[in-house]
Image: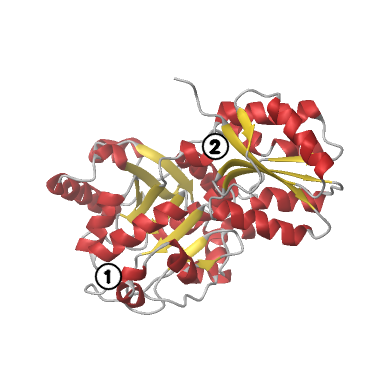
């Protein structure tokens, strides 16, 4: 079976540069130039920035968001550090200074062919459900900072954060956002639900994370399992990662979310009440017959190495390995909450922040090497 060639759409300000890119593409196996005027989605967009780069960045971001292209290479007649930073934030995989170098472009295309597209590597998307073993363990802190760390790794417009704490949603406070919609409106418009409608009710944080939380109390009848499933299935079409701050795990809606989740992060502190509750949760999952244990990732928050309960004792009690430990850093955690900022903004170099970054890398299924390769143009310009 012959592999399909990756289709490349080229948008440049002048025809000479376009012809140059076309010649290079035609010399690399596995690629073809998309005919001008064809509306089919492209595997790669090569886009030249002009005299108004901010406007051009908006066009590129819109094309990536609408999936008109899966990856983007950018080029510009003039480059500077500010332009390169914006290029990375918009999700550019490569940046070529002009005059472009043939071998540089060829090598970038070979890398793309070898590594594949990020979107195609992810089966639809991943629903990461953050569940607390009890109240007060830091579930919202984990959900918010995991979501913002995922965006830092995978690029803007790739992550949405959904707050399922119906009575007292807290993610807007953690990100200093004011939700304008509520679950009642979603339920009333169930027949209209599509990506366009969902995008209109989401809030976008400056980090690049999209957020949905109810602007006021929503009751159980309004937020039915059917409504939530419909919303999650639509978000799967729009985002690579859906991070859910799930609240409890008992009522029917949360149980449906558990069934829809690809990963369940069970957040726990090393205290006897938490360990006892976690054991009950595992027993409850076994009674229900879902989720399977391999989907449950045990995360110890506020971890202290000299804790009175060793990790080995917790693992033995639950018959489940600890997946991740997040260090205790009360000052930075509290400051982030009170200021309504994620840790990547408030304390980017803190050990706590780095722990969330590494957790995001693990859950995204990407190694640090791959992350560096994705920003390889940065290495070329700033090394």
Which residue, as the protein is rendered here, is positioned at the far left?
A: 287
Residue at horizontal 47%, vertical 75%?
Answer: 179
Residue density around tag 1, few if under 14, some if 14–19, many if 20 or more, within 10 Å: some
- Residue 76 pos. (x, y %): 81, 47
If the image is split into quadrants, where does the C terminus sit? top right
Residue 116's tag is none
Foreground label between 2 and 1: 2
Residue, disc 2: 117
* Nearer to me, 364 or 236: 236
The reply to whether residue 196 is visible in this rendering is yes
The reply to whether residue 382 is visible in this rendering is no
Q: Secondary structure at mark 1?
A: loop
Residue at horizontal 29%, vertical 53%?
Answer: 274
Q: Secondary structure at mark 2?
A: loop
* Nearer to me, 102 or 288: 102
Residue density around tag 2, few if under 14, some if 14–19, many if 20 or more, within 10 Å: some
* Nearer to me, 120 or 344: 120
- Residue 68 pos. (x, y %): 56, 50
- Residue 321 pos. (x, y %): 33, 36
Residue, disc 1: 223
Residue at horizontal 54%, vertical 59%?
Answer: 209
């Amino acid at each position: 079976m012959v592999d399909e060639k990756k289709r490349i759409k080229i948008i440049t300000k002048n025809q000479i540069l376009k012809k140059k890119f076309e010649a290079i593409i035609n010399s690399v196996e596995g690629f073809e130039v998309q005919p001008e005027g064809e509306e089919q989605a492209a595997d790669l967009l090569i886009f030249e920035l002009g005299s108004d780069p901010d406007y051009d960045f908006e066009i590129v971001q819109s094309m990536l968001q609408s999936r008109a292209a899966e990856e983007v290479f950018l080029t510009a007649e003039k480059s500077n550090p500010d332009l390169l930073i914006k290029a990375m934030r918009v999700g550019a995989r490569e940046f070529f200074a002009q005059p472009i170098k043939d071998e540089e472009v060829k090598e970038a295309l070979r890398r793309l062919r070898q590594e594949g597209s990020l979107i195609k590597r992810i089966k639809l998307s991943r629903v990461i459900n953050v569940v607390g073993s009890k109240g007060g363990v830091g579930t919202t802190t984990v959900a918010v900072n995991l979501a913002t760390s995922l965006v830092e790794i995978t690029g803007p417009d790739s992550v949405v954060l959904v707050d399922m704490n119906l009575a007292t949603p807290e993610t807007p406070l953690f990100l200093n956002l004011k939700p304008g919609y509520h679950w009642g409106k979603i339920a009333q418009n169930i027949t209209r639900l599509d990506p366009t409608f969902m995008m209109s009710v989401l809030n976008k944080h400056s980090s690049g994370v999209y957020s949905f939380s109810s602007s006021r109390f929503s009751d159980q009848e309004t937020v039915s399992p059917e409504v939530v499933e419909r919303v999650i299935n639509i978000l799967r079409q729009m985002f690579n990662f859906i991070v859910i701050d799930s609240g409890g795990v008992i009522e029917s809606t949360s149980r449906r979310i558990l069934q829809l989740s690809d990963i369940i992060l069970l957040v726990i502190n090393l205290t006897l009440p938490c360990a006892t509750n976690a054991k009950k949760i595992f027993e409850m999952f076994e009674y229900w017959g879902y989720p399977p244990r391999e989907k449950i990732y045990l995360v110890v928050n506020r971890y202290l190495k000299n804790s009175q309960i060793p990790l080995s004792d917790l693992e033995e009690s639950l018959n489940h390995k600890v997946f991740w430990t997040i260090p205790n850093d009360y000052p930075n955690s509290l400051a982030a909450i009170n200021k309504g900022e994620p840790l990547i903004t408030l304390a980017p170099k803190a050990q706590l922040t780095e722990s969330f970054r590494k957790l995001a890398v693990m859950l995204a299924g990407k190694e640090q090497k791959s992350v560096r390769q994705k920003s390889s143009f940065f290495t070329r310009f700033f090394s």
